[in-house]
Image (spheres, helix red, strand yellow):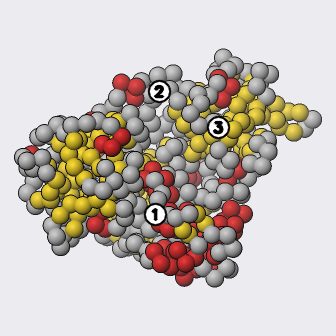
Amino acid sequence: MLLREIQFPCVENPPSCFLTFSDVWTHLSCNPSDGSTFMSKNRLGWEKWEIIVQDHNTGHSLIKHKASSRLLSADSDGNIYTQEAKDGTVADSSALWIIQENIVRSVAHSNLNLGAINTRGDLTPKVSPDNKNHAIVEYITGELCFFSSPDHDRCMSCGPMGKMSMSPNWKGWEVFRIIGVGDGSRHVRITSWTHDTKVLCHADQGRVFTSNNEFGMQSKWVIERPYGDSKGVAVKSAHFGSYLSYNGESFVMEDSIDKCSLWDISSAHQQKYYLSSVCHDKRIGYDNSKDSIYCSGKRNEWEAWQINSEGDGLVSFKSCVDGGKYLICTNGGKLKASHEWNGEALWKLEYSPHGGIFIISRNHDWHLSCDGQRLDISPSKGIGQTWILEPIMPSTISMDQITMYSSIGAATVALSVAMPFAIMGIIGGMGFTAGGISAGSVAAGMMSAEAIASGGGVAAGGTVAVLQSIGASGLGAAGFAGAMGAGGVIGASGGRLATAVMGKSEEQKNEGTSSSSNTNMAYCNWRHWE
């Protein structure tokens, strides 16, 4: 196995979902203004929930409403309500849930199901022993990937109108989300990252298309490696058993596998990260003109690093600047950049109790440190030595956003934000500032329009959030990582990168994992499936 081929998966976190009552095809919703819960046929912002694991050993989790941040709870009579989340306070059992086989069960009520009862012709959410009309977790987040054809040297793309095509680009329209169906099978759904309601589907005539929120059999796929020395994976219809192919002109379904039906799956962040200090919101940069490592408050290409797995729990960091060099710790304990790959370029990752990871020199066993002004190596293990690895996602913008912002005269600027390294002066002039969004500005109008369109909230991955994250120079590292992804994309801040390098912690060993394949490896690591 070539270690450099091991990819760290790009996973959205925390997991988002609909709580769906499949027998009547309704979803649990919440009114952000008063916190009341009700049943809804919609699949909008008010119907989206986040699952936040509180205890990996017991599986106890919070279910947080995305639009209001309120916690789903059950009172002593089993009635469903929401309560405000209190920072630093451990939630009582009324707000704790266990999710087993995608069924939601209340901890306070001896693991009875989250269900619904018929009250005067209306369904009312309630904890119930009824095993028929219960809520299931319908995940809408997953692993973000590119699907490229080795035969055509193109990427699968869902363009501005949500139509499928092949593209030479590796941008946001080419990123797709792989979501486990959660029914105990290997079935997955494939959705567009940019147009998150667009689901990849197929018809019995072999037609391939995208559909809005389609969750029938025509949207279920199986991703498998057809034979050991293949150049890619096969994407097979779970219903018909035919294979997704591209014949040079259009997508088709074929009965057998050939070179046109092989796909290379790679992680959406392309292994590129910002290395950000938790307490100072500073990053590690490399200036190739001065050949020096420096402390930076920016997020540009000079602060971008490619992370490679080097085996034995070690990684290396290579600058993404042209002719990039490795971050090394010299024998004298100094941080420098070098073209040479040797022991000085090797680093260990360890979990930090301060909400990130420690980055430790293999040669010296000292920790990468930042005091807000300069970078150093330190024997200490504190918050000043704690880092978050922010995945760098490709730029994107949806047709809905373009249309909406055109109506308020902001389309040109919105499109410019979709390009990397947007001009700060333009963004600040719109009203996206370090102090927040200025009242009466174009930014305020954009925020209002996006909140209305999304059912009451501004999407974390939306253009408003991205603009504000760029304009707010004091935004924390974790906040920026969430803003740049559709709902939040994790690198090592949530432990996924560290887990990929170091293996699972004792707590995580007891946590259930979703199977990406028969080997529990990420889809981007299909080359190493057994």
The three-letter code of the residue at mark 1 reads: Ser
Residue pictured at 52% horizontal, 48% vertical: 141
Which numbered disc, 3 or 2, marks the residue closer to the eye? 3
Horizontal side of 327 relative to 146 (left or right) equals left
Badge 3 marks a residue whose secondary structure is loop
Residue pictured at 50% horizontal, 79% vertical: 426
Badge 1 marks a residue whose secondary structure is loop
Horizontal side of 257 relative to 488 (left or right) equals left
Which numbered disc, 2 or 1, marks the residue closer to the eye? 1
Q: Residue furthest top?
A: 110
Query: Mark 1 and mark 3: span between their CA atoms?
Result: 27 Å
Q: Looking at the rendering, in which quadrant would you find the N terminus?
A: top left
Q: Nearer the viewer, residue 103 or 434?
A: 434
Residue 190 place in picture, x, y as percent: 50, 54
Q: Earlier in the sequence, mark 2 or mark 1?
A: 2
Q: How many labels were placed on the picture?
A: 3
Residue 228 place in picture, x, y as percent: 24, 46
Q: Quadrant of residue 326?
A: bottom left
Say which residue label 1 marks: 473
Q: Nearer the viewer, residue 488 or 125?
A: 488
Dot label at residue 56:
2
Residue pictured at 44% horizontal, 68% vertical: 395
Badge 2 marks a residue whose secondary structure is loop
Say which residue label 3 marks: 85
The three-letter code of the residue at mark 3 reads: Ala
Which numbered disc, 1 or 3, marks the residue closer to the eye? 1
Horizontal side of 341 relative to 455 (left or right) equals left
The three-letter code of the residue at mark 2 reads: His
Q: Earlier in the sequence, mark 1 or mark 3?
A: 3
